[in-house]
Each structure stands twice: as structure tokens, then as C-alpha cells.
Amino acid sequence: KALGQVNTIISGQCRDKGIQYECRVDGNVRDNYIGDDMKLRQVMINILGNAVKFTPEGGKVTFTVEETARFEGRSTLKFVISDTGIGMSREFLPKLFDAFAQEDSSSTSRYGSTGLGMPITKSIVELMNGHIEVESEKGAGTTFTVTVTLLDAEEKKENDVPGDIAPHEMCVLVIDDDLVACEHAQLVLGQVGVSCETALSGAEGLEMTKLRHARREPYNLILVDWKMPGMDGVETTKKIREAVGEETPVIILTSYNWDDIEEEARSAGVDSFVAKPLFAGTVMDEFKEAFRTKKKRLAEETADLAGRRVLLAEDVDVNAEIMMMVLSMREMDVDRAENGKIAVAMFSEREPGYYDAILMDMRMPEMDGLEATRCIRSLDRPDAGTIPIIALTANAFDEDVQRSLQAGLNAHLSKPVEPEILFKTLEGLL
């Protein structure tokens, strides 16, 4: 939590100044340790704040964390902060931890002094029985290394994932244009037994999600980076929801404050947000909460369509199988007709009100969808003119939609049909 708060503050400062910010956490670093998080947070913010302060626009600040030793209930953590800023001469380094230290008037007029931050930082580190070192070269940047030893916290077992899913049975998709971030996610999630697949763009992640969904092996969780080129995390989530529906929780990963996009992101289908760097415990906690909330909401929505009986007219076996699988997601009963002529016969043979809706493919042998719809609408029975009939077609041109409506169809969906759009259409018509 402390590291996430530091990242949110510093990433915002870097963004405002036009500086690149990178945070790397070694896979051995655990979620929790016992120590004074307030003091440690102050140390990191002081050093990182100065790194931002003395790095010009276009520069870079890098923050890495690793666990270097573990022995008898204690662990040593090393924090390294590097920048490409103005740097310091060797002669000035011994004075760095003096109050309001400054190397020369030119740097002070442009960047200001180090203030009280550095002497306070050194004092805090020493109070924590830690050590601080600095390396720098004039014009070539600065690197601070802080080591502290903390007590080990009790390991939290991630074996209580909701929905009867054990971590080793989970498969998570991480979508991030940063390859190192993807590899880090695989390492961190792997430590709690979670399988992880990665995609380096929103488009790639969308295709992987569609493929898993088509194989009836959907991801248990999708983690998507907010800021990516081409298609950002919010747009990627929106496309995923349109393609495979709302069932899989989607969590946005970001180093930035998400207040400005939270409303838009949730409207797009985002369930939660997690600050970078990624920790398995944080992800699992957010997953559990998103799972519970989503399960409750989907249960309420499912009640609207559960038990409804649909007549599906589709001549292609694969298409019919996929559509029946999609409808079963909302617990609907499906009868299939292999062509329009059979669909008319099946509808005619059942008592009025037996079917709640008809999904009608437009291109079928024997009798196409338009002709079958006209036949059904002309039948002398009370539900012939009122039963919702939805066109399924590969054509999405305006004239095709108009022809469908003129034939008596209520709605027109383009193939491949997106589950969420299908469900919303059925809910609206029923």
C-alpha cells in the first residue's frame, strides 16, 4: 500500500514535468512487511521528489525495489532511485546531507536547494537501522541506494478465492505494452499459483479474450494497463465487454491517479483499479471483491432471461453451437431449426406463448430468414404478430436492416453476434 501511494504521487509529478517514470519491483518482494511505513514512505518521497526536482524535462527517474536477504523472520530490502538529472560533483557529495545544501548558485536559481529533505531522510534511515548511499556525476545523473531491514509479516494464503476457484485453477490475462511489466506480473502471480498469459497491446488482448471465450475457457480475470498506445485500457475494456460480455472481472493497472477516468472506466465495464507495481495479494483482494459484486449483479440480470425459451433458426452447425452456448450463459432454453421452413413448422406446432423469442439467420436453404419471418407473422395465432424475432446476418448495411424490419423482424444483429448486445436486445424486447 505504501509503495502504491508513493508511485501515485511521483508518477503524477513526473507526468506534469514531462519526465519518464519507471518503477520495477523484484519478484521476490512480498506484499507485506512489518515496519514503520510512514517513515519509509517519507524517505522514498523525499528522495524521489528531489530526483524529479533536479531532472529536466525529457529525463527519466527509475525506482527499483528488491529483497536482498531473508533470515530468521527478517528481510532486507534495497530501494534504488536513479535519475538522469543534473548530477553532483564528487566534492559536493559529502555535503549533500547538510541542511539546504546547494552545489552552486546556478543550479539553485534553476532548481532550488535540497532543503531539509535529505538530512531528515538520512536521520530516518539511520533510526530504522538502515543505510543510505549516493553516487553521482556532474551532468550524468544521481543514484541513491537505501537498505533497511524489516520484520517478515505472516504470509497470507490465497486459497479462499470465491466461486470455488483455487488459485492454481485460475488463468489471468495481463494486457500491457511494457514487456517487463508483463513478465513481472507472470512472476508475481505465479508465486501464488495463478497461471498468467500476456498481451502487449489492447488489440492482441481482445483477440486472445475472444479466442478463450470461443473455446469456452474464459479468463478468470483480466488485468489491463491504463496508458497504452493505440487502444488504452478503458477502450480495450469496452471492446472486451462488447465481444464477450460482463462475466469476467476487468481491473485497470496504473501508476497514475485514476480519479479523472473512474466514471468513464466503470461505464466501459471496468470493475476495479490497482496501483502499480503489481502485488499478488492486492490483485487477489480486488478480484474477490469484483467477483462478489459482479456475481450479485449478474444474478439479478440473469433472473430476467433465465428460463426463457428461444427458437434458433441457423443452418450452420458451428454457428448454432456457439449461439446456443452464448444463450446458455443466461440460462435460456434453446430449440434449433436447421432452416427457415423447419422454424416455421416448429413455431406452428407449439402452443401460443411457448417460445419467448426467435433468433433468425437470414441466409438458409429451403427458406431464408426473411421469408420465414413473413410466414410466422401471417399465421392465425395470438403470438404470431407479437413474438420478438431478431435477425442474425453477416450484412450490416442500412438497406439490409430496413428489409429486415419491413419483413416483420424486431431487431437486426450482425454476425459474429456480441453476447452483451444480444442480451441487451433480448432484455429490451422481452
Image (cartoon, rainbow, N blue to C red):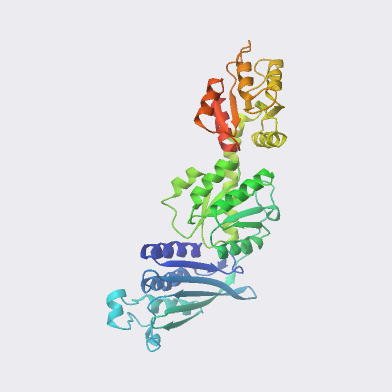
Query: Which quarter of the rendered picture does the C terminus lie within?
Result: top right
Q: Position of residue 255 (x, y in %)?
A: 47, 60
Q: Position of residue 359 (x, y in %)?
A: 63, 27
Who's the residue at 71% across and 27% down the image?
A: 336
Q: Position of residue 58 (x, y in %)?
A: 39, 69
- Marks counted in the figure total 0
Q: Is residue 82 visible?
A: yes
Q: Is residue 246 visible?
A: no
- Observer-nearest residue: 195 or 84? 84
Rendered image quadrant of residue 354: top right
In the depicted structure, whether residue 18 falls above or below residue 54: above
In the depicted structure, whether residue 69 falls above or below residue 181: below
Q: Along the horizontal axis of the image, is 20 left or right of 182?
A: left
- Observer-nearest residue: 301 or 423? 423
Who's the residue at 36% across and 69% down the image?
A: 57
Residue closest to the far top: 380
In the depicted structure, whether residue 136 falls above or below residue 277: below
Residue closest to the far bottom: 91
Who's the residue at 48% across and 43% down the image?
A: 267
